[in-house]
């Protein structure tokens, strides 16, 4: 729900009054992947939607999906999808 904001285990630990190690352990146990991997996947899936459904720039999409820079966004996007964000948009045009 708040994937576009800066979310860290430290922030969650303070919010829920639990250590970040406990949150990490519980999250991985219940979801099956680490919190960071989950958050990254959510951000990438939402960025895919924005790439296909809007004319927004890659820089703007990186901001809207919680990445700290467009270069980091492009690197992570390519690592997960196998292609660059603009190539994803081009390959999936109607």
Image: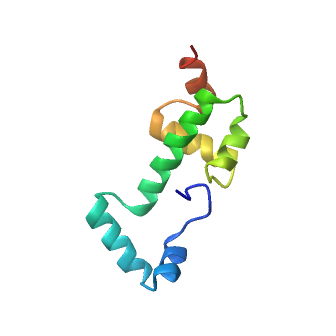
Q: Position of residue 70 (x, y in %)?
A: 69, 45
Residue name at image x 42 percent, y 84 percent: 18
**Left or right: 75, with 33 as reference point:** right
Q: Quadrant of residue 58?
A: top right
Residue name at image x 45 percent, y 48 percent: 41
Q: Position of residue 55 (x, y in %)?
A: 71, 28
Residue name at image x 42 percent, y 55 percent: 37
Please give the count of numbered marks on the rendered protein: 0
Residue 69 vertical placement versus 12 (above, below) = above
Residue 12 vertical placement versus 49 (above, below) = below
Q: Position of residue 81 (x, y in %)?
A: 46, 34
The residue lying furthest to the front in this view is: 1
Residue name at image x 53 percent, y 48 percent: 43
Report the front residue among 6 and 68: 6
Q: Position of residue 54 (x, y in %)?
A: 66, 30
Colour logic: rainbow
**Left or right: 32, with 87 as reference point:** left
Residue 65 vertical placement versus 24 (above, below) = above
Instruction: For the C terminus, give its image quadrant.
Output: top right
The residue lying furthest to the top in this view is: 94
**Left or right: 81, with 61 as reference point:** left
């Amino acid at each position: 729900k708040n994937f576009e904001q800066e979310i860290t285990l430290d922030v969650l630990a303070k919010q829920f009054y639990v250590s970040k190690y406990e949150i990490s352990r519980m999250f991985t146990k219940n979801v099956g992947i680490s919190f960071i991997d989950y958050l990254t996947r959510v951000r990438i899936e939402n960025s895919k939607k924005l790439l296909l459904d809007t004319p927004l720039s890659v820089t703007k999409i990186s901001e809207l999906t919680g990445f700290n820079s467009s270069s980091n966004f492009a690197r992570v996007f390519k690592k997960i999808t196998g292609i660059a964000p603009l190539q994803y948009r081009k390959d999936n045009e109607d």
